[in-house]
Image: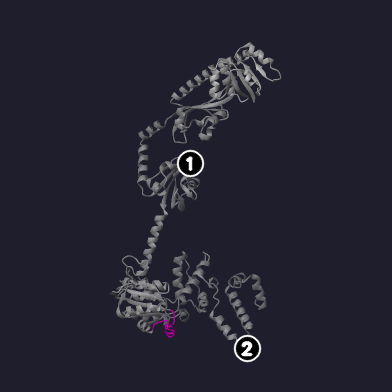
Amino acid sequence: MKNVIIIGANKVGTALVKIIRKSNALKLMAVIDPDKEAPAIKLAEEMGIRTSEAWQDFINEPIDVIIEAAGDEDIFTSLKEVKDRQWVIIPSSVATLISGLMEEQESLITQLSSQSRLQDLVLSSSHDGVIAIDQNRKITIINKSARTMTGLLDESAIGKEITELIPNSELPRILNDGKTEVNKKQVLDNGRKIITTRTPMIDDEGKIIGAFAVFKDITEVVEMAEEVTNLKSVQTMLEAIIHSSEEAITVVDEEGKGLIVNPAYTKLTGLKSEDIYGKPATTDISEGESMHMRVLRTRKPVRGVRLKVGPNRRDVIVNVAPVIVDGKLKGSVGVIHDMSEIQSLTAELQRARQIIRTLEAKYTFSDIIGDSKEMQFAIDQAKLGATTPATVLLRGESGTGKELFAHAIHNSSKLKYNRFVRVNCAAISESLLESELFGYEEGAFSGARKGGKRGLFEEANGGSIFLDEIGELSSDTQAKLLRVLQENEIIRVGGTKAIPINVRVIAATNVNLEKRIIDGSFREDLYYRINRLPIFIPPLRERKEDLGALCNHLIQKLNQDYGRNIEGITEAGIKYLEGYDWPGNVRELENVLGRAIIHLSFHESWIDVKSIPALTSNTNIKEQKASSHSPQQSLQEQVEQFEEELIRATLVQCEGNKTKTAKELKLSLRNLYYKLEKYNIE
């Protein structure tokens, strides 16, 4: 950068100060003139530039250029006489010429600006929109009407690529084709409808240097036409129907841009209509895929899809269907359901079902399957117990159907129209069981409900209460239960007032109460109170003749649970089941049949031996083992003999399929082959 000083602060000097200040190659160090009131001196002082009355003050400064603008020959001569200075001295004649040229340039710029303002005024006053682009498709002209119609209110649109701001602009095509288009209809991104004429701009050499469009907004005209043909009233009615719906509804056009949302949608998602209108269908999705876009892509409806929508990430279920008019896809409509409300209703329904299951008996004696003498004797005893108010004690192994008997006894008694309350004494913690059975008064313990709570005995008043697993009661609870049975009254926890009750007690246990009495864990007096009418329910191993009827009954139940249509079990399958001792009783039988049905292919309709999972404790195997074992055999010999018998039985069950046999025995195929060779099994 060259350092410059100006000598002379007249009109020429002032012009030079302005020129140099705009230059990036020159740095103005000082303005010199004896007249402190000279215009250039004042201008320099305003700009923070040094001033002086004599140029000699800067003789030792690093000066590159000196402009003598005062027109004083003596000053010019004295400057030339200075020795050892590499100054470039510009005389006043040259300075005057430069100043004149600058004034002429400013005059031309002023004229050009005036013409440009006039052009802008003309364009701005036009009601028609005007947009022009250069050969690089960049916007060079956009008037006020065009900005209003397109929504590009920011004047920064000048210089930007037109499709960046107006994606569906046709001007680039005119730029490429060079053909004029007159009175063409177009719909802008904001929904405005226009009539436009597009023309290429061609220079004197026939080269296309740009294109421009002049267009008129006809939206109001179209709207008036729609009103005349009653389309507007139909649309208004449709919107009124959608807005009156309590279901959240959203509608998009064929491009997936929002058209309509109703107040229910706004309430559910937290998004207003202005957040959706004209925006992509993915705008409201906070987690998941837009079902609108899927439907527009596939033209097929979707049902029951879970998504999260809106800024609050509401969990919803959506149903979306395409809108097809005259075979053309026009958009899609979606209905949104709030999952929180559905979950709340489901929870309430579940609670209601639990209460209903607790307060009513579902089964009767016709639901008890069994023609064996042992089972018929138990049923006859139960029917006898139903006719008396005496306490009934149901005894039997786990899974024999004690609760089924309890339901049937209640439903066959005079109390069948009253409540039936079920209590699993082993499922409730000892600390809670007492308050659950007998209730509590307000303030009885920390966290007690205001006003207290009725116990299960009070809930069952006038009906029956089924105390399952009664052998698991603590000593304190046994004592209180004994009082209930003797006095027909209860006292709530934390209370002193006796509350009379009339409840039929049906108890059940799978433990040996007599042994519990001996070891002191069960009260003898309570035992005699509940053992008025004991009913022993036989285990499944003692009534194997009932297996066929039980299997058919359970298969029908499992068909409903699994959505299958299994017809039954083969005779060979029943024979195989009869060889098992069923330690888990009917409950285990249902489990085995359920697993068999799960593994059946859908074209199979009968359960056969090969479908039944391996029953490794088969009685016939045990009998063979017992008969073949002798005291003289070592432990290793007995283990190997049992292993051989088990492999042979499983191989028969799997019809010789070694891969399936290995899977059933949980062996590797290689290990199975080793054992087959070891025991010489073909």
Membership of 521 in magenta stretch:
yes
Q: Disc 2 versus disc 1: distance between alpha carbons? A: 88 Å
Percent from the top left, x then y, of residue 531?
37, 83
Per the image, the residue denoted by label 2 is 632
Q: State the quadrant of the C terminus.
A: bottom right
Q: Which one is earlier in the sequence, the residue at label 2 or at label 1?
A: 1
Percent from the top left, x then y, of residue 637?
64, 83
Residue 349: quadrant of the picture: bottom left
Per the image, the residue denoted by label 1 is 255
Q: Work out whether residue 599 can be spotted.
A: yes
Which amino acid, mark 1? Glu
Q: In this view, does 246 lie to the left or right of 183?
A: left
Percent from the top left, x then y, of residue 587?
46, 74
Check disc 1: other Cα within 10 Å, few if <14, some if 14-19, many if 20+: some
Percent from the top left, x then y, of residue 385?
34, 80
Give the residues in magenta.
Answer: 510-523
